[in-house]
Amino acid sequence: MVNIEKIIYYCLVLFIGLFFPAKAISQEYKFELGAATGTSFYMGDANKTKLYLNPGISGGVFFRYNINFNWAIKTNLLIGQVSGNKKDSGNTLPFDKGRDFSRIFKELGAQVEFNFLPYSDKYSYVGTKPYSPYVFAGAGLTQASGEKSFIGFNMPLGIGFKYKVRNRVNIGVEFSMRKLFADHFEALDNPYGIRSSMLKNKDWYSLTMIFLTWEFSSRTDPCRGM
């Protein structure tokens, strides 16, 4: 029983430390504002397997709230371009439905990020590092122009790496896949005639971005609680 109580105690301490942190285990600045640029590509009915096929240009701005050394919440506004055709992908569609397509998309989204290392260029006495790999997941809304207009929800899943160049300034790179909950991002609505589900017959698009951010809103007294 004592061992079980200890396990419960340590789990509670870990949970409180992650989600209700004190300033003593928080980054020096609460917020980040930044910009990103990179490339985007599509995967779906017209491209099943080939990464970075017909890549387009993407970019945007984002805002991040640093909860503590390990957790952050990010919102973004992005714009990008995706394109494709049946010939390049080598994918054969029923009744020769495949054709060229091109879309300009816009995305408004939010993600929760987890840093694998306690991220800060200060407080080394608690083991912080000025760099960290991270993962993220979230939700967003995508709107795209083209022959058939598109609007739908997306679920981003991704990985990244960030580094503090100097106090307040961060650079990084991230790769993500955006799962769409609709099947006509490339203007081909269910060409195989297969009934859709959450995991089947949906389109994706991907972003590879390099970003630069600036931190602001200092936590003036890191020795006190929030």
Image: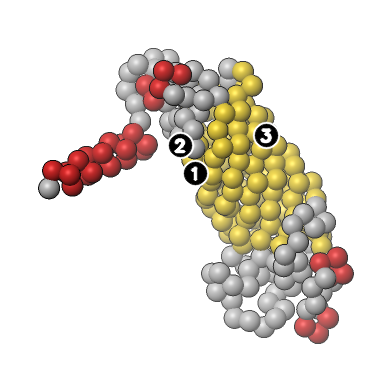
Residue 192: quarter of image = bottom right
The relative height of residue 215 versus residue 60 in the rendered view (above or below) is above
Badge 1 vs badge 2, beta-carbon distance below 8 Å: yes
Residue situated in front as seen by the camera: 129 or 107: 129
Residue 71: image tag: 2
Residue 196: quarter of image = bottom right
Query: SS of the residue at dot 1?
Result: strand
For marks 1 and 3, the one nearer the N-term is 1
Q: Residue furthest front?
A: 3
Q: How is the image coloured?
A: secondary structure
Compute the Cα span from label 1 to label 3: 17 Å
Q: Residues within 10 Å of mark 1 (few under 14, many from 20)?
A: some
Residue situated in front as seen by the camera: 212 or 153: 212
Q: Where is the C terminus found, in terms of image quarters?
A: top left
Badge 1 vs badge 3, beta-carbon distance below 8 Å: no
Q: Residues within 10 Å of mark 3 (few under 14, many from 20)?
A: some
- Residue type at mark 3 is Phe
* Residue 78 in sight: yes
- Residue type at mark 1 is Val
The relative height of residue 30 versus residue 158 in the rendered view (above or below) is above
The residue depicted at 62 percent of the width and 55 percent of the height is 178
Residue under numbered circle 3? 211
The residue depicted at 33 percent of the width and 18 percent of the height is 224
Q: Residue 212: x, y in percent?
A: 67, 30
Q: Residues within 10 Å of mark 2 (few under 14, many from 20)?
A: many
Residue 112: image tag: 1
The relative height of residue 186 versus residue 212 in the rendered view (above or below) is below
